[in-house]
Amino acid sequence: MKRSTGRILTTHAGSLPRPSDLIEMYRDQAPDASVEPRLKAAVAEVTREQVDCGVDIVNDGEFGKPSRGPVDYGAWWAYVYDRIDGFEVRERSMEGGNPLQFGSKDRKEFKQFYDEDGGMGAGGGRASAGNRLAQLVCTGPVKYTGQALIQRDIANFKAALDGVAVEEAFMPAVSPATMQILANEHYSNSRDYVWALAEAIREEYRAIVDAGFLLQIDDPALVDLYDWWFSLEKGMGEYREWAEMQVDAVNHALEGIPEDRVRFHICWGSWHGPHSSDVPLADVVDLLLRVKAQAYSVEAGNVRHEHEWKVWRDVAKLPDGKVLIPGVVSHATNVLEHPELVADRLVRYAEIVGRENVIAGTDCGLGGRIHPQLVWAKLRMLREGADLASQQLWR
């Protein structure tokens, strides 16, 4: 994995805006014969757009992960259920909100907000998609069946990179912890369930690394499930026990994969809500650093978590050889971060962990969270801010 030698490198967290016609094809479940050529062209387009914005470490926008819901959010985790066996749809009532979020203190304290707004500022579309996913239940042995799909995504991205100058390229894949969100009726306990999921998704991880790309593991569940499942009644002790098991599971999935090919992304969920009961980074940073990855991608621009740069000064030391990817532009606001603000944030991290150990990133995937025009503007601000920080750090 490349480091920031001579200047601050830039990247992002994964999801980018999809073309409207590709979204419609996915929603209409168009035949592969029409989707495949458009998908390949779209990946080439989004790769060039990233380069034009000054992004150094690019991905395929996650365009090969179809979203079937009424609003397109990149299907960053839902995609996997088209790639594994062992789940089936169970009809159930969705009254009273999303059953995936049955223990949320945030949703209890701000019930009026969530009832009226859905937590999205976009008609509550994501809640509808989440409710649909909540009907999936594990009813049999989990097995990865997505070999052809991940190879298609790899081939499309390789073709898009041909003749394009980038520092590196990455592909995201979902974590076992996030897959474990859905109900289990087959495995006798939660450990067996998450271990089976880790065994299954390991195939996708290896395919990405074997293709020569960096692997990014998307694991918002590691931190945002504290609010969803533990904040009302169970508390920190039970949460920590659960989280330790998830770290063991992802490390199991990563066995045999070199750490310097892995970046690990956490965030506290991309919904536009209060986030009043998010677990503090200081309470989980030790678990984060146990993950067998070289780079850690964390929120640093979201106003609920921007102050947590202090964690790296006061609580945890970034281990030697590791890289930090602070999200210095955010999905949580339409306001464009000024390049000087971006630079200030980056310099602050660089002064703590070392300039060569910082890569400028985004809080979360930007696709579907803010208007596409703003996504590209924010990535340009990211580049300008990284250049300003580089001027200060290497003068």
Image (cartoon, helix red, strand yellow):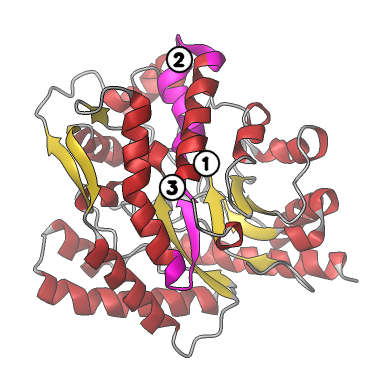
Q: Which residue is mark 1?
A: 267
Extent of the magenta region: 209-237
- As shown in the figure, which amino acid type bears the numbered disc 3? Ala
Query: Could you say which quadrant of the image residue 40 lies in?
Result: bottom left
Q: Which residue is mark 2?
A: 109
Q: Which residue is mark 3?
A: 253
Horizontal relation, residue 207 to residue 92: left or right: right
Q: Is residue 71 above or below residue 42?
A: above
Q: CA distance from mark 2 to mark 3?
A: 37 Å
Query: Percent from the top left, x then y, of residue 154?
Result: 35, 72
**Most foreground residue, 342 or 11:** 11
Residue most toward the top?
A: 233
Residue drawn 40% across the image and 69% down it: 60
Residue drawn 58% across the image and 64% down it: 11
- As shown in the figure, which amino acid type bears the numbered disc 1? Cys
Q: Is residue 342 above or below residue 284?
A: below
